[in-house]
Amino acid sequence: MARYSVLRILCAVVILLTSAFAHMQMEEPSPLRDPHSNRLEPKDYNILTPLHADGSDFSCKGYQWNTPLTSVATYQAGDTYQMRLKGGATHGGGSCQISLSCNNGIRFKVLKSIEGGCPLQKEYDFTIPENAQSAQCLLAWTWFNRVGNREMYMNCAVVDIVG
């Protein structure tokens, strides 16, 4: 009996440590291929990994080209919203941007830059430009870590903009 209790405790510790040392990801809005979503789309169980160093999976890991584009949020032009992150390995912070692309990730408009200390806090406000046109767009979170190898992380969520 005690053996099973020890095994359960060890399993719990492993799960907690895994989540504590996981890289960061956008939680809200839910990114493309989020393994935690209930959307009917392929899942990326390595969503916490950085983009390839050669840039071959920029932007959005290329998911906008081979994943059903199901909107997860609707944003009104001129209004302010919040993006939420989750994970534990912040690599000492770094710099992040929240940006918007309404042409499938070919061009992005930066909505907010966080220079230094990102993603030490888990929630960031951003404002949709007042002149934004109604469209289905990609809201992107990009992060360059401060400690460790220089890596670029990127998650993209499909959102509807109402202009």
Image: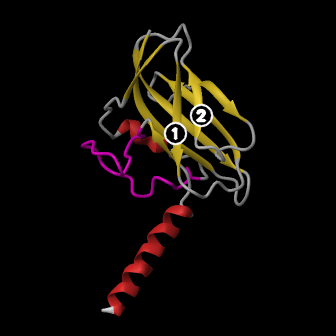
Query: Quick check: marks 2 and 1 in contact, CB under 8 Å?
Result: no
User: In the displayed structure, would residue 158 be above or below residue 42?
Assistant: above
Q: Which structural element holds mark 1?
A: strand
- Amino acid beneath label 2: Tyr
Q: Is residue 42 magenta?
A: yes
Instruction: Pick whichever, 48 or 83, lies toward us.
Output: 83
Instruction: In this rendered view, identify the residue nearer to me: 38 or 123.
Output: 123
Residue 18, horizontal then vertical, whole percent: 50, 67
Q: Is residue 94 left or right of residue 89?
A: right
Residue 134 position within the rendered picture, expressed as x and y whole percent measured from the top left: 41, 11
Q: Is residue 35 magenta?
A: yes
Name the residue nearer the viewer: 57 or 12. 12
Residue range (magenta): 30-52
Name the chief secondary structure element in magenta. loop
Asked if 87 appears above or below 31 in the picture, the reply is: below
The residue to which callout 2 is attached is 124
Name the residue type under label 1.
Arg
- Percent across and percent down for residue 162 are 41, 12
Colour style of the rendered protein structure: secondary structure
- Within 10 Å of the Cα at label 2, are there few (<14), some (14-19), or many (20+) other Cα atoms? some
Q: Residue at x 33, y 46 (%)?
A: 37
Quarter of the figure that contains the N terminus:
bottom left
- Of helix, strand and loop, which one carries label 2? strand
Provide the residue designation for mark 1. Answer: 84
Q: CA distance from mark 2 to mark 1?
A: 7 Å
Mark carried by residue 55: none
Residue at the location (44% across, 57% down)? 46
How far across and down, in percent of the image, does residue 69 sit?
Answer: 33, 32
The residue that appears at 47% across and 74% down in the rendered structure is 14
| Residue in the picture at 67% in, 46% down | 144
Q: Quadrant of the C terminus?
A: top left
